[in-house]
Amino acid sequence: MDDTSPVGKLQVRSRQVVSGGGSSVTEFTVYCPFRRRSLGIDECEECAAYDGTSDGSAGEPAEVACTRLTPAPDVPPVVEVVARGALERTTVSRIMARHVVCVQADMPLQEVAAVLVRRRIGGVPVVDDEFRPLGMISKTDLVRRSCKDAEEDIELSTAAAAPAGCVAEVMTPSVAALSERASVLEAAAIMADRGIHRMPIVGRDGRIVGVVSSLDILGWISRDLPQGEGVAILQET
Ligand code: SF4
């Protein structure tokens, strides 16, 4: 596929089923805006408008060129401008959790696990005596430590399943703390860049005043920003 060709391109998605023995099956799909549905690349290849597939760095299909599509315009749609403006204007202090449970670095892991399970939260900030953030500890950190100890997968559903040790041994240290005046866009960008799900929010004195999580951001977007095209809900049968 010619990367400079003036035809529009569609991002390729992949879905993979991994089996216990290490084997896997992978399918590649794109969303066709004309048929208004996702379809396999092989179906695209049979279409008269198909103009080739470009590969990614690992040799996997990355983009499909379609002559019926015009190249994406440089100017973003109005809805994106509105959404970005709202993300930039809204401060994290408006959407963060304002009642924060914190732990200290010398707390035993079983007690932390009890806090997380009892309060049904995924993670808590670790702070010093002055409520200044030192890091974050999450269920994932505890499970990772337990797996390392047990050398097998476990699930943290009760505090008793927590590993031995203290917070300082497993917490994610030096997590970025955001000013309460920072924007939701900044919080989202940092979380996406660092692959983290929650961040402590601090006041001018560097002491914690709240926590913002990726779920807080998603919840706010779903309430306050323009809605998407559709939602697929998996129902239990
Ligand atoms: S090549 Fe055909 S099937 Fe594929 S996106 Fe374009 S119009 Fe749809």
Image (spheres, grey):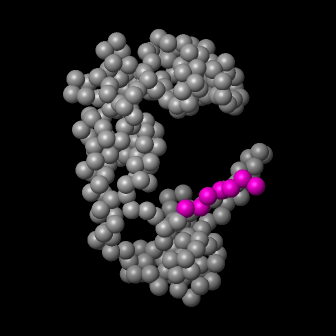
Which quadrant of the structure image shows residue 200? Answer: top left
Looking at the image, the residue that sits furthest to the bottom is 48
Give the camera-side residue of 58 and 87: 87
Give how far across and how far down residue 11 sits, in percent.
49, 67
The main secondary structure of the magenta stretch is loop
Q: Is residue 201 magenta?
A: no
Which quadrant of the structure image shows residue 181? Answer: top left
Span highlighted in magenta in the image: 231-237
Q: Residue at x 33, y 64 (%)?
A: 80
Which quadrant of the structure image shows residue 39? Answer: bottom right
| Residue 24 relative to residue 141: left or right | right
Give how far across and how far down residue 13 sits, in percent.
56, 63
Q: Residue at x 41, y 46 (%)?
A: 217
Q: Residue at x 30, y 38 (%)?
A: 93
| Residue 153 relative to residue 118: left or right | right
Give the camera-side residue of 63 and 179: 179
Looking at the image, the residue that sits furthest to the right is 21
Q: Is residue 186 visible?
A: no
Give the camera-side residue of 77 and 218: 218
Give how far across and how far down residue 110 sits, in percent.
59, 16
Q: Quadrant of the C terminus?
A: bottom right
Q: Is residue 70 visible?
A: yes
Looking at the image, the residue that sits furthest to the left is 204
Give how far across and how far down residue 57 sits, in percent.
50, 58
Relative to 203, residue 190 above or below = below
| Residue 51 relative to residue 160: left or right | left
